[in-house]
Amino acid sequence: MLFRAFAVCVFIFGLLLGWSSSARAEWSELAKEPEAQYFFDKEAVMPVHVSRYAWVLTNLAKAETTPTGEPYASYMIRLRVYCKTDMVARLSISYFDKAMGKGKEVSSEDLQEWRNRETPIRPNTYMSALKKEVCAAKQVAGLQ
């Protein structure tokens, strides 16, 4: 009986481990600048009407510090991109002590979506590259 319970626990643990490794993001490069490299998770883009929700990962050339003083080498931002108005709203941000969102999450901040300020998407920035990728005609039609 004890062996059977142990076997079931090992099986469940194996399933969870397999699921977590397959749930990792596949980052596609958006832009590269001397101070940072930008990626987005193409598979996690979620269309909602004329908006898109997307994750952006930023790798920094040299470490910076969070507002609370923690050093970080990369950060992930969850964004809502408004395709028709060229605006974007930041929903959350997580800071990591290693590149590519790896290592320890040293700080995070989640914002209420309805309280966020929308900001314009400036031309020739990684945000404009993100908008071009996620608001493309084939994604708007739902033909990914």
Image (cartoon, rainbow, N blue to C red):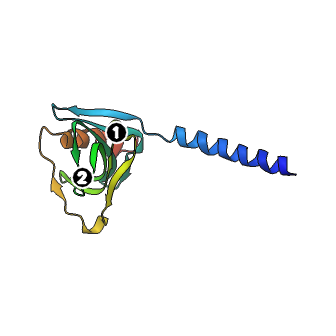
- Give the tally of numbered discs: 2
Residue ranking furthest to the bottom: 115
Q: x and y percent of residue 128 in the render?
A: 18, 42
Q: x and y percent of residue 54 in the render?
A: 33, 48
Q: Nearer the viewer, residue 105 or 81?
A: 105
* Badge 2 vs badge 1, beta-carbon distance below 8 Å: no
Quarter of image, res 27: top left
Instruction: Answer few, some or many: residues within 10 Å of disc 1's Cα (few below 14, many 20 plus, some between 14 and 19).
Output: some
> Where is 88 relative to 100, above or below?
below
Marked residue nearer the N-terminal end (2 or 1):
2
Is residue 16 among the parts visible in the rendering? yes
What element does badge 2 sit on? loop
The disc placed on residue 86 is none
Report the residue marked by disc 2: 66
Is residue 80 rendered to the left or right of residue 17? left
The disc placed on residue 98 is 1
Disc 2 from disc 1: Cα separation = 14 Å
Q: Which residue: 30% across, 63% down? A: 111
Q: Amino acid at mark 1?
A: Lys
Q: Which residue: 27% across, 51% down? A: 70
> Where is 114 relative to 22, above or below?
below
Q: x and y percent of residue 36 in the render?
A: 20, 36
